Amino acid sequence: MKKISFKGINFYTGTYNQIKKQFDKGGVLVAPAASALANIENDNIYFSSLRNANIAILDSGFFCILLRLFKFKRVTKLSGFLFLKTFLENYKNKDKILFIDPSKKSNYLNKKLLKSLKIYNFKSYLAPQYRKKINDPMLLSLVKRYKPRYIVINLGGGVQEPLAIYISKNIKFNISIMCTGAAIAFMTGEQAPINKLIDKIYLGWLLRIIWNPKLYLGRILKSFKIIKFFF
């Protein structure tokens, strides 16, 4: 497993097992998309959250290609989708998990997925609409009472990362928090039906555009702005 620093963000490249071993030591794991990375200069809170995260994984195939072309770094993509999918498929109901969901619909679909995977040792929390400065005493109270070993945040990029840092700074016991956003929605069918093969051959962006061009085309085009950071 190798660590690559990019704009003060600690990216790790390696296998799922290598990343999972590091993740299990506690802290925050993030999986920033290229479109989000392209905007770090305009969102100080998000940028700070990425830099304060313990692990950033290489979610974007486009970003991996840029690292090879401009930084001569041979890296292996490990998306948030693949990390979460492998995590859930290997989960043994030993450790408690708290899922933080964005809506009632997502909460329903996520619970349905988890039960189909025979995952029962979990709780769900329906997140409110967070402001720039996050303050959620109800969530902190739940975390302190329930004491989950893992927290999976299924919110949008730019919100979930500051939330993860907020939780980690206010909790004193060992906890591992992953910010995998829409990854679980790809598995439930709420968003584009990405699978391991599509993810492996770097075509997740294309499937997303086909599934919802209005939502994703702009995001994909925005990703090209990240190139400026390599010069």
Image: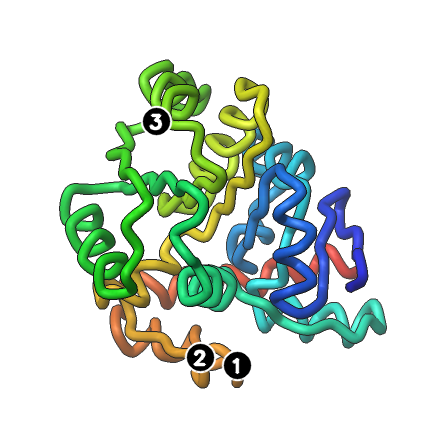
Quadrant in the picture for residue 54: top right
Dot 1 or dot 3, earlier in sequence: 3
Q: Could one spot residue 220 in this view of the protein?
A: no
Q: Could one spot residue 156 in this view of the protein?
A: yes
Q: Secondary structure at mark 3?
A: loop
| Horizontal arrangement in the rendering, residue 154 relative to residue 13 (left or right) | left
- In 3D space, how far apart are the residues under numbered discs 2 and 1 (Cα atoms)? 6 Å
Identify which amino acid the numbered label 3 is placed on: Tyr
Name the quadrant of the C terminus.
Answer: bottom right
Residue pictured at 59% horizontal, 31% vertical: 174
Q: Height in image: 183 above or below 127?
A: below
What mark, if any, has residue 200 been given in the picture? 1
Q: Height in image: 84 above or below 127?
A: below
Instruction: Give residue 37's position: percent from left, percent from top.
Output: 59, 51
Assess disc 1: are there few (<14), some (14-19) or many (≥20) residues with their C-alpha within 10 Å of its C-alpha.
some
Q: Height in image: 16 above or below 98?
A: below
Asked if marks 2 and 1 touch (Cβ < 8 Å), the reply is yes
* Front in this rendered view, residue 38 or 161: 161
Residue at mark 2:
196
What mark, if any, has residue 190 been given in the picture? none
Asked if marks 3 and 2 touch (Cβ < 8 Å), the reply is no
Describe the colour scheme in one phrase: rainbow
